[in-house]
Image (spheres, rainbow, N blue to C red):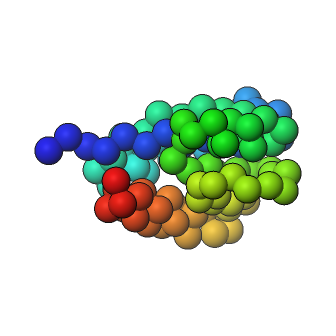
Amino acid sequence: MSKKTFNVLSVCGSGTVTSSMVAANVKDALKEAGFNARTTESRPTEALQLAQGGNFDFIVNTSPLPKGDYGIPVINAAGVLTGFGEDEFYEEVIKTAKELSEEG
């Protein structure tokens, strides 16, 4: 059976350094749980349009997102930066992946 691959949108204030770090960590966490991930980094101002394009399974974000209907799960990744709630963040990512793989 092939592993499910998730398309993850990783969002931080500048859309570069932090989102790249979080994206790499999410890929590793999902790989350990038996999933693959493709990640795209973006700024908050791009996130709603990208999410509504239908190409992503969920969003991880370290910066607040503009209000709107993203239509996919949004997981706050601030714990990765602070170290507080980091384990819970990864648990939420894996839980979301498992739920989405059952739906698909």
| Residue drawn at 31 percent across, 44 percent down | 4
Give residue 17's quadrant in the image: top right
| Residue drawn at 72 percent across, 34 percent down | 42
Which is nearer the eye, 17 or 3?
3
Give the tally of numbered discs: 0
Horizontal and vertical percent for residue 43?
A: 79, 36
Give residue 39's quadrant in the image: top right
User: Which quarter shows the N terminus?
Assistant: top left
Horizontal and vertical percent for residue 38?
A: 47, 34
Horizontal and vertical percent for residue 24?
A: 53, 38
Residue 96, above or below 3: below
Horizontal and vertical percent for residue 86?
A: 60, 63
* For residue 41, side relative to residue 34 (left or right): right
Query: Can residue 72 be seen in this snapshot?
Result: yes
| Residue drawn at 57 percent across, 63 percent down | 89
Residue 30, above or below 45: below
Residue 61, above or below 51: below
Query: Can residue 20 be seen in this snapshot?
Result: no
* For residue 38, side relative to residue 36 (left or right): right
Give residue 15's quadrant in the image: top right
| Residue drawn at 54 percent across, 36 percent down | 55
* For residue 7, side relative to residue 59 (left or right): left
* For residue 66, side relative to residue 61 (left or right): right
